[in-house]
Amino acid sequence: MRFLSPLFMLLTLAWAVESYSQSNSNASSEASPNRVVSQGPAKGTLMVIGGAASDIFYSLFMELVGGADAPIVVIPTAITSDSLTAEDLERFKNSFTEKGFKQVTVLHTRDRDVANSKDFVKPIKNAAGVWFSGGRQWRHADSYLNTRTHKAFFKLLDRGGVIAGSSAGATIQGSYLARGDTRKNTIMMGDHEEGLGFISNVAIDQHLFARNRQFDMFEILENRPELLGIGLDEDTGIIVEGDQFTVFGNSYVAIYDGTRWSAERDTIYKLPAGSRDFYLLNEGERYDLLHRQIITK
């Protein structure tokens, strides 16, 4: 019978203890209630589009809300004009009726008292879906954040409704409001930093590759490392259901989650702190918001 040397046994025991501790540490970290996670709505669906949305997104929106006869609300408040005339609102409505929607209500105000009124939110209570316009995302926040209207959006999701938006209408759906400065849209962390929060602990950017913005997200993440960064190129979006999303459209979605995924090697690499790296997902690929990693199976 062969006997192992005391030194070899000691080293083996030390390795086993370290491995066990590391395993338990990882499990505790995964289960820790203090771990910051990102989550989508418990019910309902989000459609988050990076700008320049083509007809495929309007067709999908129509399908998700239940067809052309479903009542929808469109919100043009983010449009860059200081004021919107009745003719402007009618043109915005027509842009949806021309795509086949038959019950379209345009809802707009820049008065928070109006947004906080019972009468203003009535169309949302009857709607199957809401669409947020592009423009300047801080205008959506200025008008609706923490108002009765904001609560009505969440109630719409709770009853299984759909919230969609393109460009500014995408960024406003996150909890952190990227490019929310009233002076110019190149300031990543501006004088408005809170979005409507349909997805928690996330910052969403848009027009990503079309405007060469793919490295801008790091300015936010270096200051708010607990956030998940999502960058959407034009005519590309994510469909969020629960804590997962699926990529849809003609370009790419950039993920800034502290890892790098190699499709070729089917491997997720953990990145060192401070790394300025991201990876890309394209149509049909899925992501787990809660665990912040790509779904590979």
Image (spheres, rainbow, N blue to C red):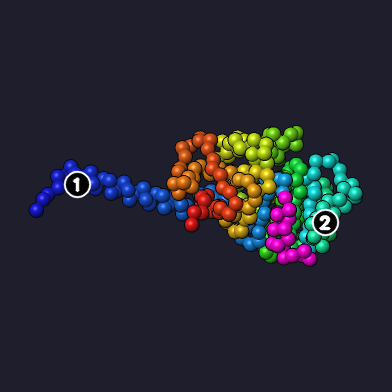
Label 1: how many residues lie within 10 Å, few (<14), some (14-19) or many (20+)? few
Q: Would residue 245 be counted in the magenta stretch? A: no
Tell me the mark number nearer the camera, choosing from 2 and 1. Answer: 2
Which mark is drawn over residue 9? 1
Residue at 29 percent of width and 48 percent of height: 17
Q: Residue 36 location, x and y as percent?
A: 53, 48
The answer to whether one can see residue 220 in this image is no
Residue under circle 2? 98
From the viewer's side, name the closer residue of 63 and 37.
63
Q: Is residue 46 above or below residue 226?
A: below
Label 2: how many residues lie within 10 Å, few (<14), some (14-19) or many (20+)? few
Marks 2 and 1, the one that precedes in the sequence:
1
Identify residue type, mark 1.
Met
- Magenta stretch: helix, strand or loop mostly: helix
Q: Is residue 297 above or below residue 79?
A: below
Q: Quadrant of residue 70?
A: bottom right
Residue lying furthest left: 1
Residue at 9 percent of width and 53 percent of height: 1
Q: Which residues are magenta?
A: 54-70
The answer to whether one can see residue 110 in this image is yes
Residue at 57 percent of width and 56 percent of height: 243
Which mark is drawn over residue 231? none
Q: Is residue 135 left or right of residue 226?
A: right
Residue at 45 percent of width and 43 percent of height: 269
Q: Residue 266 location, x and y as percent?
A: 45, 49
Q: Residue 209 location, x and y as percent?
A: 64, 39
Identify residue type, mark 2.
Glu
The secondary structure type at the circle numbered 1 is: helix
